[in-house]
Structure formats: C-alpha cells, structure tokens
Image: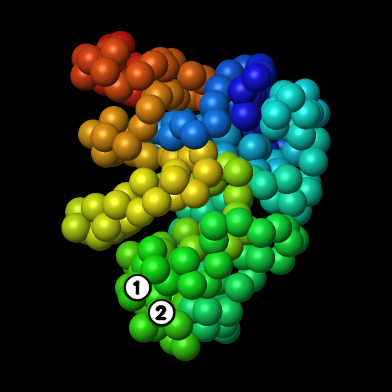
Amino acid sequence: MALLETHGLTAFYRDFQALFGVDVTLDAGETLAIVGANGAGKSTLMRSISGVLINGARQILFEGRPIGALAAPQVMALGIAMVPEGRKLFPSLSVEENLLIGRYGRATKGAWSLETVYRLFPILKERRNNPGTALSGGQQQMVAIGRALMSNPRVLLCDELSLGLAPVVIRDIYAAFPAIRESGASIVVVEQDIGQAMKIADRLYCMMEGRVTLSGRPSELNRAAIHAAYFGADS
C-alpha cells in the first residue's frame, strides 16, 4: 500500500478548474519532485493534499484512509506537514516562537525537537531571538522547514523551496534532505528547476495545465521528454 496517493484528483477555485484527474503516488521513504511551469497546478496539488483545499474524500488517500475532505488541521494531525510557498512566517514572533508553533495540533514524539532542528540549521540557534521575518530569505526558509519538522511529520510537503533564493542558499537548503529522510519522513517537493528536481528525487512528476504529463525515475527520463512535458510538444 502506498503511503499517500491521489486518484483522479480535481480541484477548483470557484468556477475555475485547476486540476484535472491527477494521479500521484508516494511510497514510504521516497522523495517525489513535482515540476512544471507557473500555473501548471503544482501548488494546487499541494494545497489539496494538505487540506487547504477541500476535495472528494476518496480522491486523496493516506495509508489507505480517505482524507480528501479533511480540513488542514485534521490532515496535519495525521502527520502531513506543509512548508508553504513564501514561507508564511509570523512577523510578530521570534525564530524560536515560529518553530514552536509547529508542534501545535500534533503532539507526538519523534526525531524532531528544537535541539535537532537547531542541529540541522545551526544559524537558527544563533538567531533564535530575532524576529522570524528579520532573517535572510534562505534563513526564513530554514525556519519554515524547521517549523514543519517540529510536528514530526510522516510526509513533508515543500512548495517552491528555492523560489527567489541564490544557488548557494538553495544548495544549503537541499543539503538538509538526507537528514529529513533518515528521520523517517517522506518528501514531496515542488520545484521549477528541473535539474535540481532530478538531483534530489526518487521519482518525478511533470505537470502542465492541471494534468500530469510525464512521470518516472530521473534515470529513466531524458531532457527532451521532460521539456515536452513541461512546456508542451510544440514549444
């Protein structure tokens, strides 16, 4: 049984349909990368899985349990945590207070605590009393990841981790992935950079206009096929 899967997933913003029958499967211990251009439906997929958008109950399954109709707090309590696009830190709170918020709603023991998050991102311990939004973009992203890890998730959803960050900062962010996987979390990461996605993913899904256009292991996919699935065959 897959850890997490979607079946014919559709999603709407009022009258606008954003997803059209999306099928995605995540096995325990895997890292999936979801790639695609702006407007492909990647973030909508993440919002659907995390419960920000409500869907048909059986369109999303977690360990075989229908969760598509659950709200975000219920999904988070099951062990699915989100690192949202844009970080979404609380500006009135310190770094440490932002991290501690990640524990609310899921009181479970596991690998992640303030101590282990600080070990993963040492700069956050140095800045723990600073306002979260006073940090650099890369450091804010570390806070957002650490906040999600504080819930000791089974599945970590990461939406556009590298957006707006310098290459050296992106490298430092992704260097944390092995430790996250070793803690027992499976990862789904949305990434516009195809090269970066292929480096870190066990399997890759490409989306365009709300549909999955290609999937497979990076070793099985060539650049021409990915380009066609990303931009369309005529581009």
Looking at the rendered structure, the secondary structure element under dot 2 is: helix
| Residue 152 image point, x, y percent | 60, 55
- Marks 2 and 1, how far apart in space? 5 Å
Vertical order, 20 against 136 (above or below): above
Are the two marked residues, 2 and 1, in contact with CB atoms closer than 8 angstroms? yes
Looking at the rendered structure, the secondary structure element under dot 1 is: helix
| Residue 100 image point, x, y percent | 61, 73
| Amino acid on which disc 2 is placed | Lys
Q: Residues within 10 Å of mark 2 (few under 14, many from 20)?
A: some
Vertical order, 231 against 68 (above or below): above
Where is mark 2, residue-wise? Answer: 125
Identified at 52% across, 83% down, the residue is: 94
Where is mark 1, residue-wise? Answer: 122
| Residue 124 image point, x, y percent | 40, 75
Identified at 52% across, 54% down, the residue is: 83
| Quadrant containing the C terminus in the rendered view | top left
Instruction: Determine the image quadrant of residue 137.
Output: bottom left
Vertical order, 217 against 125 (above or below): above
| Amino acid on which disc 1 is placed | Pro
| Residue 46 image point, x, y percent | 57, 40
